[in-house]
Structure formats: structure tokens, C-alpha cells
Image (tube, coloured by chain):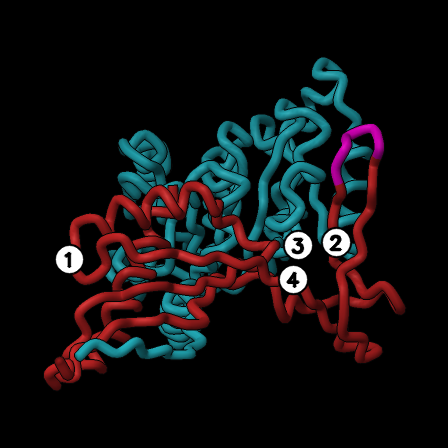
Chain colours: A cyan, B red
Amino acid sequence: MHQLVSVDMEKDLLEANRKLAGENHDILKEKGIRSVDMMGSIGSGKTLLIERLAIFLKDRNIKAGVITGDVVGDDDYKRVISQGVPAVNVNTGKECHIDAHLAEHAIEDMDLENIDVLLIENVGNLVCPADFPLGTDIRAVIISVTEGDDMVRKHPLIFKEADVIVINKMDLAQVMEVDIEELKKDAFTVKPGANVVVTDAKHGVGIEELAEAMGLI
Amino acid sequence: MHELQIASNLVNAVMDAAKEYKNATKIETVHLSIGKLSFVGEEQLRFCWGAITDEREILKGSELIISDEEVEISCSSCGYVGDLEVSEDPLYHYMMPIFACPKCKGDVEITKGNGVTITNIKLMIDDGEETDG
């Protein structure tokens, strides 16, 4: 005879990711490595900012390692290693973000004994990475003026999650007719007390302020 | 997109729960609560759920019942627990959540509304007894 059984439960499907993120955090903390998840929109300048940060830190005898995440390809990885910075490439395949599981494998492949700082470049996306913390000390969100002045208001949740908000390509603000103050105002509306840094990665402006905001120096 | 990953995790979790019942023959319904702040799209999730469950006899035709989970925030400074404040901008025709305490403007933690949670499953089991008549 068949019988219908009702089973009440409370199983969070995002919990597995958060648990792995906690494990990643413990591994990095044990090695004394400061870590940053660099989230942000496509073309906002994440890779160049990472290159600038890594070189800035190298000049101060702080060794950075980089995990480059993209859906496919190794373009960003090649750019980073060409600067003499150790890197591990992660291709997410179908996925729109790096999750804690992919980060875990990339961390395994990284020589943790020889780095002080780990910068993880997430897939260019202002939506999905918000749901998937990787276990880093800092979660940073990078946007640039070329995406327009409504990026914050269109994606508020990821900015709530951000310990540091970067507005890049300040040198192009005038030509793009984008008001950086407008972007800042939205950031402070969504997240009062937000830690906002304005940069021009192309010309190396604001890198020291960014390193400071991320607690890397 | 990540609805496929979520749907796959959902199927695995439901199958794990069903394993507790040796004679489970069919999963009838799965109740899922999606937080209003999570980035999981209901339509995309239903599509992925249908595609995955169609391949498994025990899950084929199972009904996925989705409800919204409201957002709740809590403030560590003044102890406020409750709704999130939103800023309505008529220019943009949408509301922007403000992740600060509505009372003291302090930093808040999101305590509800950002998860994807299975709350109940109903499954048919065969208890092995013959039906009378």
C-alpha cells in the first residue's frame, strides 16, 4: 500500500558554499595570507587593477599571488604572469561566478608558502558572485565610469556585500559625462559608511589608497 | 547561469532526504523558499528543475512549489530587527534597498531573505502491505 509522507526540513542550498568558504578562509588565515575577492563588472578594469596592486606590493616586498577567473580562456592569467606575479587560472565553464569550491582547488594549486596576499579575480558580473562568498578577508567590487552612473542602483546587493567599493577609470569621467559623485552618493545610500576608493588604473592613480583600504599595507 | 547549479544541489538534497525512506517510490512535491534578496530566478530554476528531474524516475513530474522569503535585517548597534528600508526613485521606476538600520543608521546584518531553502518534501512510500480487496 502506498502512503504519503511529509518531511519538514530546513536545508539551505547556499550553505554548502558558505561552509567551503569558511574552510578556505581558515587555510589562508593559517598561512597568514590576506585575501581579497575582486568582483566587478565586465571591462571595469579588474585585471589591470590587480596588476597594479601586485606590482605596488612587490615594490614594498609584499608578495602577491593571483587567481584569475574567467568563463573561458587564459588571457587575464597571461597578463598577470607576464608581470612576474604567480597566478592560477580558473575557468568556470558554464558558471557566471567563481564559487568556494572552485576557489578551493585554485588555492590548492597556489604556492601558499611564497605569498603574503592573495587576489582573486572573479568573473565579470555584478549579480551572481554576491550569493557565493569565497572565504576571503575582503570582498571588493569594482565598477568604472564607462558603465554609466547607474551601476550601483542597479545592483545594490553586491555593494552591500562589499568591504571596499572601487570606482575606476576616473580619467574618463569627463568624456563619458559621468558624475563620480553620483556613483558615490548611490554607494553611500545603499551602504552608509561604505569604503569607496576612486582609481585610474591605466595611469596608476589611487593604487596606494586602494591597497590601504584593503588592508594590504 | 547558477540556477542550474542550484537545481542540481536541490535534486541532490531531495534525493538524500528520500534515501532515509527505503521504500520511497515517488517525490510528489518539493517546497522551496527563495529569499527576495537572493539572485535565484524562479523561472530559470523551474526550467532547470524540469530538465533534471525528467531524467530520474522517482522525481519525474514532481511539483516544485516556490514561495518568497521576506527580508529581515538586524542591527548590532540598537538591536532593531525588522524590515529593510527602501529608497524609491520615480526617475528609475524601481526601489533601491538601503542596507542600514532604519532607526540608528548603524550597520546591519541580513538575517532573512538571502537564502534558498528546502522547507518540506512530500514523498510516496510503499509500505509493502497488500491493499484490501
Dot 2 falls on which chain?
A
Please name the predominant secondary structure of the magenta segment in the image.
loop
Q: Is A150 left or right of A93, judged from the image as shown? A: right
Q: Which residues are magenta?
A: B90-94
Question: How far is the residue under mark 4 from the one under mark 3?
Answer: 17 Å
Residue B16 is a magenta residue: no
- Same subunit under labels 2 and 3? yes
Q: Which residue is mark 4?
A: B70
* Pointer 2 or 3: first along the chain: 3
Q: Are marks 2 and 4 on the same chain?
A: no
Which chain's residue wears label 3?
Answer: A
Q: Which residue is mark 2?
A: A191
Q: Residues within 10 Å of mark 2 (few under 14, many from 20)?
A: many
| CA distance for labels 2 and 1 | 47 Å
Horizontally, residue A19 falls left or right of residue A178, namely left
Mark 2: which secondary structure? Answer: loop
**Circle 1/circle 4 CB separation < 8 Å:** no
Q: Residue A64 or A3: which is nearer the viewer?
A: A3
